[in-house]
Image: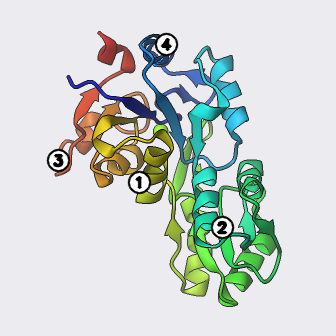
Amino acid sequence: MKNYQAYFIDLDGTMYRGTERVEGAAEFVQYLRKHQLPLLFLTNNSSRKQEQVAAKLMDMGIEAYPEDVFTTSMATASYIARHHANAKVFAVGEEGLVQALQDQGLELVDAGADYVVIGIDREISYEKLSKACLNVREGAALLSTNGDVAIPTERGMLPGNGAFTSVVSVSTGVEAVFIGKPHAEIMEQALAKMNLSKDEVLMIGDNYDTDILAGINAEMDTLMVETGVHRFEEISAYPKQPTYKVKTLQEWLS
Ligand SMILES: [Mg+2]
C-alpha cells in the first residue's frame, strides 16, 4: 500500500460513535503521531468549535489538538471571506458556526444580509427559518455547511442540516451552495491548509455519500472503514469504489 504525506480523517463513525470510541481509532492516530505523519480531522458537523472537537477526542484517548480540526463551519466562513470580505451574514446554527464566522471578521445581522448560512441548529424555529427566507428573497446568497439529510444519534436517525436547508431552498426557489463533504470546497481548503496536493493525501471515512465521495470528487485516494453508517455490501454495486476498504483502522495497521 502507498505511503501518503498526510491523512484526512472523518470523525463520526470513524473516530467515535456518539460518546464511544471506535475500535482502532486511538491506535491509528498514535501510529500517525509516532511516524510524524500529518493529519487533519475533517467534519461536516458545524455545531462545535475546534477546541471542543479536540477536547472530545482527547477525552476519549485520541491525541488531537485544535489545529488538527477543520470543520465545515470554518470552511464556510473562509469561503465567504474570500468572496466578500466584511460581508453581512444571517446564520442559522450553533456556536461552532457563529465562532467561525466571527473569526473571519464577518458581521452577523438579522436583515440585509449578503449571505444566509444554514448549519445544524438544535433550536431551529419558524422565526429563524423565516428570517433566512426573507434575507434570501431580498437577494442574499444561500450557503449550507452540509447537505446531510439525516444524522445518526443514540435515538436513531434525526433530521440533519440538509433537511433544514431544503426548507429555505424549497420555499424561496433558490438553490444552496454546499460547502461540506462531499463537495469540493472543504476538500480544496483542507488541501491548501496542509499545503499538499490531492495525490499526497488519503481521505478516510465511514460514509460513502460524504467522506468517500468527497475524496473521489477531489480525485484523492480513499479508505473506507466499516465502523459507521455504511457496510461494504451496500456499496458493492456502485461504479466508483473506495481505493481501500478495511473493517477497522486496526486492520489497516496490521
Ligand atoms: Mg462519518
* CA distance separating discs 4 and 2: 36 Å
Tell me the SS state at disc 3: loop
For disc 3, the marked residue is 237
SS at mark 4 in the image: helix
Q: Earlier in the sequence, mark 3 or mark 2?
A: 2
Disc 3 versus disc 1: nearer the observer: 1
Q: Position of residue 98 (x, y in %)?
A: 76, 55
Residue 182's tag is: 1
Viewer can see residue 16: yes
Whole-number angstrom distance, CA of label 3 to CA of label 2: 35 Å
Distance of label 1 from label 2 (alpha carbons): 18 Å
Can the viewer see residue 183 in this picture?
no
Three-letter amino acid code at disc 4? Gln
- Quick one: label 2, few (<14), some, or many (20+) residues within 10 Å? many
Q: Residue at x 46, y 48 (%)?
A: 192
Mark with earlier residue (1, 2): 2
Label 2 sits on a secondary structure element that is: strand
Which residue has dot 2 on it? 117
Q: State how far apart marks 3 and 1 are (Cα).
A: 19 Å
In front of the other: label 3 or label 4? Answer: 4
Residue displayed at 66% across by 67% down: 117
- The residue wearing badge 4 is 30
Q: Given the image, on which type of amino acid does mark 3 rest?
A: Ala
The amino acid type found where label 2 is placed reads Val
Direction from residue 102 to residue 212 in the image, left or right: left
Question: Which amino acid type corresponds to the residue marked 1 in the rendered image?
Answer: Pro
Give the mark nearest the N terminus, 3 or 4. 4
Establish whether ligand 1 lies closer than 8 Å to the Cβ of label 4: no
Residue 37 in percent (x, y) is at 42, 22
- Marks 4/2 in contact by CB < 8 Å: the verdict is no
